[in-house]
Amino acid sequence: MPRCNRCGKESIIHDKSQGEIFCKSCGLVIDEKIADLNHDSVSFEDRKDNRRAGTPMSMSVYDFGLSTMISVINKDAKGNSISPSTNATLRRMRILDQRSQLHKHIDVNYKIAFDVLQRIQDKISVSNHVKELAAYIYRKAVERKITQGRSINAVVAASMYAACRNTQTLRTLKDISDATDIKPKKISQSYRALVKQLDLKIPVVNQVQCLSKISNNLGVSEKTKYLAMEILQKAADLRILAGRDPIGISAAILYYACLIKKETFTQTQVAEASRVTVVTVRNRFKEIRKIIRIDLTK
């Protein structure tokens, strides 16, 4: 089993849902944005190799990827070039084919929504697993008519945020907001509607992993990181983590530890490393320091 380059322990974990390889002991992210090369294993014939052709079914395609389309390659079956007149006919047929596939209003809705979803995935760099879950949540939202009275973009953004929370993929509302140019407040409103009306079970975020990732992004010392873990444990014992944004709390705790260990990281730097606002770091820090008093002169 491979060892961690930082702590030397054999505790390397491959998190397929987040597309990351990290050390469980020290939290070092060794590799991320790993492509998911898996395919579906459905076989319609009685054979052992399960070979297949074409793309697998996808929740993030308006028709689940089951429709056919006229190829854009202007060659015949033998590889010979097609004449200009035939090419013009095929071009018109492609346009008619595309229009005929979007004959339902709901198909148009899904087509617009999943194009937005793809752009969000490209900008915030999450795995296909997260995108597929977001597409599933959005489809359920359409079925329950949660999208009525709300913009498609806002509900798609909220679905992606819910998928990130569900898979414990560390992306903030600000990440989603920056990727969609939608205010965090609007995304948050749609997110709360999804959680309530779809009865989504959002797991508690692993605060230790969250804190470790921010520490690695910021580049703090091991002593500061260890102290931050101690403060985090105190905060958990005092039950001041409930109902708080886990990333904002982790960022504030890390900033507190940096002050104690006299590491010259500003609130702005901590906010950038954790992808939250400076105001969030400042407010959470004030709350934590008021409850957990540590002498900064030591």
Image (tube, rainbow, N blue to C red):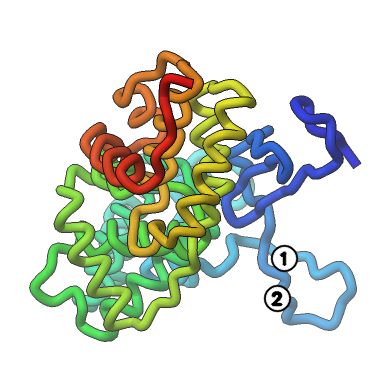
Q: Total number of numbered labels?
A: 2
Say which residue label 2 marks.
42
Q: Which residue is mark 1?
A: 52
Residue occupying the point 32% across, 38% down: 285
How many C-alpha atoms fall within 10 Å of the one at disc 2: few (<14), some, or many (≥20)?
A: few
Amino acid, disc 2 = Val
Q: Is residue 272 above or below residue 166?
A: above
Residue 158 placement (x, y as % from top left): 29, 61
x, y (%) of residue 9? 84, 37
Q: Nearer the viewer, residue 264 or 169?
A: 264
Q: Residue at x 29, y 74 (%)?
A: 194
* In the rendered image, the vertical position of residue 129 relative to residue 229, given as above or below: below
Are the two marked residues, 1 and 2, in contact with CB atoms closer than 8 angstroms?
yes
The answer to which of 64 and 98 lies nearer the viewer is: 64
Q: Is residue 237 above or below residue 298?
A: below
Asked whether the viewer can see residue 67, the reply is: no
